[in-house]
Image (spheres, grey):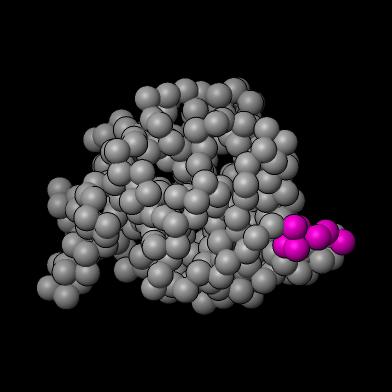
């Protein structure tokens, strides 16, 4: 049984659409609607955005398992940094369950939104080969600082990133995925092999890693389910498949952190996205406490 701690990161500064900062409260409302005491059961800390790296690191150093509930996905760069700062000598792997690869840089981004960049920050990649933008010096300076948070850069290597259900990418991202041979389990592959086998294979690809961080963006689910998120994409997995996948991944002793992001109740109807997300969160938590 693991000692769990919930970290709430109510940030939406990295997204193009406002509202994700309210996602955590929407999940809490879903818990109440289900008659659940989930958020009274576990220690919870609301992280001030400017201090999120420090707190993440401290949680792990205290042998607490962080369940991170965040607004937009840019927070993942901070989560990865925090894990690495706490464990500088250990090799960290990432399982990225998302409709998007989130490996853009200021030189390639079509939107300028930081929630499309956290993995590029973490692998310290500029992707100059695919350059389409000319960022100003201030942006370049901030980008350098992001890549070097904690004095460790890169924090992870591309071969230690496993994608699941990524299906909406730009050619600049595809260039890096191909260049580094980054594995992506597609929806078709998930359906053909089944969630159990995909989870086993994903973990096996990170066999040489000491720790694994699992990042779950709710838009991995099909657009018919994930309407309450900023960038829904068709041809995703179902809520049941997502829950089974996360629960299976949580069985690995190497998993050191689970993060859930991009719930936007302002785009939702009857809080359905938050309800689906809460059920997946409970599946993940139950697996952790029953180990």
Q: Is residue 36 left or right of residue 274?
A: right
Spot occupied by residue 78 in the image (x, y as percentages of width and height): 39, 59
Q: Quadrant of residue 91?
A: top left
Return the residue found at the far right: 35
Q: Is residue 272 above or below residue 189?
A: below
Q: Is residue 16 above or below residue 289?
A: below
The answer to whether residue 256 is visible is yes
Q: Is residue 261 above or below residue 201?
A: below
Residue 229 shown in magenta: no
Q: Quadrant of the C terminus?
A: top right
Q: Quadrant of the N terminus?
A: top right
Spot occupied by residue 190 in the image (x, y as percentages of width and height): 58, 30
Foreground residue, 171 or 77? Answer: 77
Return the residue found at the far left: 137
Q: Is residue 137 above or below residue 290?
A: below
Q: Is residue 62 left or right of residue 54?
A: right
Q: Residue at x 50, y 69 (%)?
A: 47
Q: Residue at x 26, y 42 (%)?
A: 175
The answer to whether residue 275 is visible is no
Residue 39 shown in magenta: yes
Q: Is residue 252 left or right of residue 275?
A: left
Foreground residue, 111 or 9? Answer: 9
Spot occupied by residue 89 in the image (x, y as percentages of width and height): 29, 38
Which stretch did the figure color magenta?
35-41
Spot occupied by residue 218 in the image (x, y as percentages of width and height): 59, 54
């Amino acid at each position: 049984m693991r000692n769990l701690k919930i970290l709430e990161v109510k940030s939406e500064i990295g997204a193009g659409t406002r509202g994700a900062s309210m996602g955590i409260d929407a999940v809490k409302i879903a818990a109440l609607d289900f008659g659940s005491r989930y958020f009274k059961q576990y220690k919870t800390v609301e992280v001030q955005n400017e201090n999120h790296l420090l707190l993440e690191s401290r949680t792990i150093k205290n042998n607490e398992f962080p369940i991170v509930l965040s607004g937009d996905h840019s927070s993942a760069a901070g989560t990865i940094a925090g894990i690495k700062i706490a464990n500088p000598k250990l090799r960290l792997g990432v399982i990225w369950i998302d409709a998007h690869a989130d490996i853009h840089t200021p030189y390639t981004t079509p939107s300028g939104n930081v929630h499309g960049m956290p993995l590029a920050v973490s692998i310290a990649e500029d992707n100059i080969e695919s350059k389409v933008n000319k960022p100003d010096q201030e942006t370049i300076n901030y980008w350098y600082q992001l890549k070097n948070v904690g004095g460790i850069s890169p924090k992870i290597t591309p071969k230690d990133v496993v994608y699941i259900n990524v299906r909406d990418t730009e050619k600049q991202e595809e260039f890096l995925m191909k260049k580094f041979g980054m594995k992506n389990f597609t929806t078709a592959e998930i359906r053909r092999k089944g969630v159990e086998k995909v989870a086993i294979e994903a973990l096996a690809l990170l066999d040489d890693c000491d720790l694994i961080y699992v990042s779950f963006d709710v838009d991995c689910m099909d657009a018919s389910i994930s309407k309450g998120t900023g960038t829904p994409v068709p041809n995703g997995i179902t809520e049941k498949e997502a829950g089974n996948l996360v629960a299976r991944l949580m069985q690995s002793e190497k998993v050191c952190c689970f993060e859930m992001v991009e719930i936007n109740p302002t785009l939702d109807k009857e809080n359905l996205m938050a309800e689906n997300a809460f059920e997946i969160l409970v599946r993940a938590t139950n697996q952790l406490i029953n180990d």
